[in-house]
Image (tube, rainbow, N blue to C red):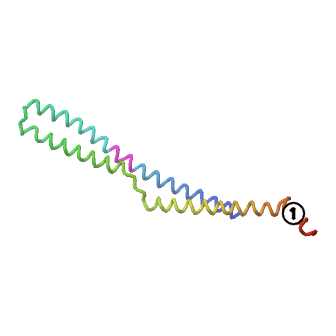
Amino acid sequence: MHFFDVGKSAAQAEVQLLQQKAMRIGRQVALLLVAALLGFFSLITGHALLWAIFRYEFGFGPVTSPALVFFVDIFLALVFAFFGRRSYLYPAEVEAHLNRDRRLNELRQSLNMLSLATLVAGPLGRFVGSKLRRR
């Protein structure tokens, strides 16, 4: 029964690891969506900025405001894209990796012991044991 308990704990460790990965990827997707939205708004603002430049021929009144909004949108889009592309391993995910690896090693050891016990207690083990006892 120890073999099944080790297998169950290895499966639980794998589930925990997948949950941590899903949370990390979800954060990345959310940040990239914000970056894409701000990039879209930057395009709209850029068009408005070009319109204002052509309309007022480099006048500072109506052009300064869209220019500032344009540069703020570009800056925020770059910041969100930078943070969205970075992939940090959180401590819980590292712990899940370690836990899974530990459980899988236990599972391998249990499997080795189980196969060794089967070999000794099985027909081949009984045959070799009877031959050794006769000598």
Q: Is residue 92 left or right of residue 30?
A: right
Query: What residue lies at 47% left-to-right and 55% top-to-bottom?
Result: 20
**Residue 4 percent across, percent down from the top left:** 67, 60
| Location of the C terminus (image quadrant) | bottom right
Q: Is residue 74 left or right of residue 128?
A: left
- The stretch in magenta equals 27-33
Q: Characterize the local packing of mark 1: few (<14), some (14-19) or many (20 or more) Cα atoms within 10 angstroms.
A: few
Query: What residue lies at 20% left-to-right and 37% top-to-bottom?
Result: 45
Residue placed farthest to the front in the image?
135
Q: Amino acid at mark 1?
A: Val
Q: Secondary structure at mark 1?
A: helix
Asked if residue 92 lies in the magenta stretch, the reply is no
**Residue 44 percent across, percent down from the top left:** 22, 35
Asked if residue 32 lies in the magenta stretch, the reply is yes
Snapshot quadrant of residue 121: bottom right
* Residue under numbered circle 1: 128
Q: Is residue 79 left or right of residue 16?
A: left
Q: Is residue 36 above or below residue 51?
A: below
Q: Is residue 73 left or right of residue 7?
A: left
